[in-house]
Amino acid sequence: MNFVEELKWRGMIHDIMPGTEEQLQKEMTTAYIGFDPTADSLHIGSLVQIMILVHLQRCGHKPIALMGGATGMVGDPSGKSKERNILSEDILQHNLKCVQKQMERFLDFKCGDNCAEIVNNFDWFKDFSFLEFIRDAGKHIPINYMMAKDSVKSRLETGMSFTEFSYQLVQGYDFYWLFKNKNCKLQLGGSDQWGNITTGTEFIRRKVGGEAFAVTTPLLKKADGGKFGKTEDGNVWLDKQLTSPYKFYQFWLNSSDEDVKNYIRIFTLFSKDEIESLEEQHNQAPHLRLLQKTLAKDITIRVHSEEDFNLAFKASNILFGKSTSDDVMQLDEETLLSVFEGVPQFKISSKDLNCDIFTFFTEKTKVFSSKGEARRMINSNAVSINKEKIGTEVSLLDVNLISNKYLLIQKGKKNYFLITII
């Protein structure tokens, strides 16, 4: 596979330095992307860059994921309107360990010559004195070259500390260190990183007369102008403790028709023919949302697991009546609360279950406004508890609780109530 061609048809190339494609065709090439360890999980914005490394490795080249243990202490000014908080070394080390585990789900670290590798730039910066740095790195890049970068120019009016101004030099030195110690000749990144990456290629040229290359990807935006990967709850994380598999699955399932055509190219490993075939089927019956369902399934399995996908899929079907009592009883508490976020909820004592069904529905929970209404709907087979239709003689003490704590009431087709038993 040709790496550049693969990225082109997937719409994943923004800028490419002359000679890059020839370098990749000439030999197995080592390339790296830097990741920001300011959180203990990556989010789906980072997934774009992870997929770049996945494609690189599938094309026979060697990927390096550089964790910015040192640069995370400085803060990249690219795309930022103000200076970022600097994290402690302990927090950064914890974040690095968490992120490394996530990387291992995508990249092959045991496949011979082109096995993936993770490095931490703190390892070569921790013993590097300030005087050594300005002597060995600072003298090679002119001030006017650094001032011309967009990430600097955009901040001149509002102000920029020397710490942030020096960031491109630090990142440039990363590229040089990898070039010298890992034979790394290519840096990859988002289009906002072009200035920092080219500082690296220039540093390598000026310091050792070496030739290095660069490729950047477009910054992903939604068709409606909204920020990709952001929801009302914030980032969509790869860690299931921060974003449940159900919410993760729903994010992709709710993609617009326009967005999903980009997403399925960027975030899956389907071939060009497979994607074009899926698009053709989708266009014939858009209401079936084939592209969204295919994308959501594929990416949920790869980020989490098939088991997590199956639970998320069953949870999604619960709201639309295509589920069984067994499906509901299998839900964990977090998924249950995610699915029924926003429905009316009541908290009652376990003692309140020791009553007739009409008292329970009208006095204990207010699911119905009157016992007469409750009787009419139950008699017409329109009421269920935990997805089991009930009769007027049901004993609430015999009903199993979801997660030993909840009852799910359904009134008619679309009205749900979640009861928490205290």
Image (spheres, helix red, strand yellow):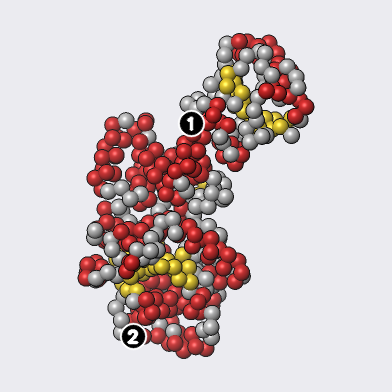
Marks 2/1: CA distance? 60 Å
Q: Which residue is mark 2?
A: 208
Q: Residues within 10 Å of mark 1 (few under 14, many from 20)?
A: some
Relative depth, front residue between 248 and 306: 306
Q: Which amino acid does the dot numbered 1 rest on?
A: Asn
Does 35 sit above or below residue 393? below
For the view shown, which residue lies furthest in the right direction?
A: 351
> Callout 2: 10 Å neighbours few (<14), some, many (20+)?
few
Find residue 295 and report its horizontal and vertical position in percent. Answer: 38, 43
Q: Position of residue 280 (x, y in %)?
A: 26, 37
Provide the residue designation for mark 1: 317
Q: Earlier in the sequence, mark 2 or mark 1?
A: 2
The residue that appears at 76% across and 25% down in the rendered structure is 352
- Residue occupying image coordinates x 50% and y 38%: 311
Q: How many marks?
A: 2
* SS state under label 2: helix
What quarter of the picture does the N terminus occupy? Answer: bottom left
Q: Is residue 255 left or right of residue 72?
A: left
What residue lies at 32% left-to-right and 62% top-to-bottom? 56
Image coordinates of residue 381 in percent, x first then y, are 57, 14
Depicted 300 relative to depicted 70: above or below: above
Q: Nearer the viewer, mark 2 or mark 1?
A: 1
| Residue 146 appears in view | no
Using the image as rendered, state which of residue 212 and residue 332 is in the foreground: 332
Kind of residue at disc 2? Val
360 or 265: nearer the eye? 360
When asked about the image quadrant of residue 158, the answer is bottom right
Vertical arrangement, residue 360 with respect to residue 316, above or below: above
